Amino acid sequence: MRIFAATPRYIQGAGILSDLGKHTSRLGQQPFLIADSAVLTLLGKQVKSAISSAGMSLSIAEFPGEITHSIIADLTEQAHAHGSDVVIGVGGGKAIDAAKGVALSLDIRMISVPTIASNDGPASASIAVYDDQHLMVDVLQLKQNPDLVLVDSAIIAQAPLRFFLAGIGDAISKKFEAEACAKAGAKTLFGAQVSHTGMAVADACYRLIREHAQAAVTAVREQRVTPEVESVIEATVLLSTLSFENGGLSIAHAIARGYSHLPRAAGTLHGDHVAYGLLVQLALEQREPAMLKDLLAFYRDIGLPYRLAHFCKGEPDANEIQLLADSSMLSPSAARFTPKVDAAQLAKAIMLVEQLEV
């Protein structure tokens, strides 16, 4: 069995936030906005104007910063009290996931408006839920992908560069993770085989990044939108989602999950962890040294981490490497690899990555 999942409508371009009202009115008439205080300060007036231009009023809830089951329940209660029939998540991944949680709870339409491109969450049906200690405790699933993903590339280009880089880190692994899942006979999130479409999209995602990332990073550093920036945003927000939902996640994302247990990773970004995790996966696959060196040089040139020391000053010791390996094995993604690996093999691969020369 093969299942292909995707958002029904993806719209990307500079300045398209002004069209939000027009697109929202096709999905509902009582929109409920979820965004954090910084996003409301930055974009609140534009969003209100866009919604009012379509003849609708907007109910607003401030996202507190972490997505927990209790926060979802509280936001759901607010949306229900307003009689909302469509929820709009504006901001980073957690604010958008909170909006997804409300949509799931009330069975209403959902619109995703990312202000950063640090991961592929905006177009995904997945909802990552955390506890008060910021550890992931649950992954929920919308009945379908967001009804609309609206990506204003001018807003993305004005965000701090570190988020753009993290998006590249999260997306660049998808080709290799989909290949690993297919080789292992692993199922996708939908219990289906890895599809040829998922594999093709994952390959396109990787090629776009390798071809355009360096020029795109230079442009974003200068807060400019260029064709290269548009290409990389499409890869990191849309194609990356299509890749993991229809292809699957493997060791690279298992390592990323393990990073949540490392003190040195506090305050660092998921995409950075995935980028490092890809190197570990490729080491496990015993890829040619030339291939690994080429990828390390790419990481170095655009600014992605390729050493544990890049996440915090100081070299890791054997205990920390073992902690990363042990914690990574807790992720379901660790099982989507053949031959099966254990923590000792992961630790050995991590040590190999630490010794690679650029």
Image (cartoon, rainbow, N blue to C red):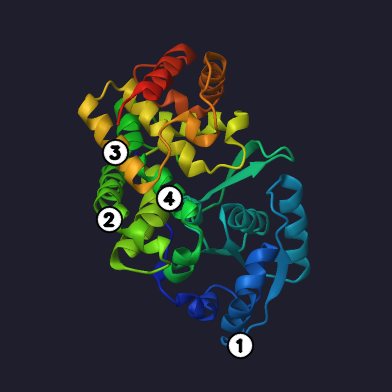
Residue 165, which numbered label?
Answer: 4
- Which of these two is toward me, 54 or 80? 54
Q: Label 3 amino acid?
A: Ala
As measured in the structure, the alpha-carbon distance from the residue carrying label 4 to the one carrying label 2 is 13 Å
**Label whose residue precedes the other's in the sequence (1 or 4):** 1
Q: Which residue is mark 2?
A: 212
Q: In the picture shown, does residue 296 fall above or below 314?
A: below
In the rendered image, residue 217, in percent from the top left (x then y), is placed at: 36, 56
As measured in the structure, the alpha-carbon distance from the residue carrying label 1 to the one carrying label 4 is 38 Å
Q: Is residue 242 left or right of residue 331?
A: left
Quarter placement of the C terminus: top left
- Which of these two is toward me, 338 or 132? 132
Q: In the picture shown, does residue 25 fall above or below 113?
A: below
As measured in the structure, the alpha-carbon distance from the residue carrying label 3 to the one carrying label 2 is 15 Å
Q: Are marks 3 and 4 in contact (CB under 8 Å)?
A: no
In the rendered image, residue 267, in percent from the top left (x then y), is placed at: 61, 42
Q: Label 1 amino acid?
A: Gly
Residue 221 visible in the current orientation: yes
As measured in the structure, the alpha-carbon distance from the residue carrying label 1 to the one carrying label 3 is 52 Å
**Label whose residue precedes the other's in the sequence (3 or 2):** 2
Q: Which residue is mark 1?
A: 55
Q: Is residue 202 left or right of residue 310?
A: left
Q: Quadrant of residue 182?
A: top left
Q: Label 2 amino acid?
A: His
Q: Quadrant of residue 252?
A: top left
Q: Are marks 1 and 3 in contact (CB under 8 Å)?
A: no
- Give the number of marks: 4
- For marks 1 and 3, give the one nearer the viewer: 3
What residue is drawn where x is 31% and y is 53%? 213
Crowding at mark 1 (Cα within 10 Å: few <14, some 14-19, many 20+):
few
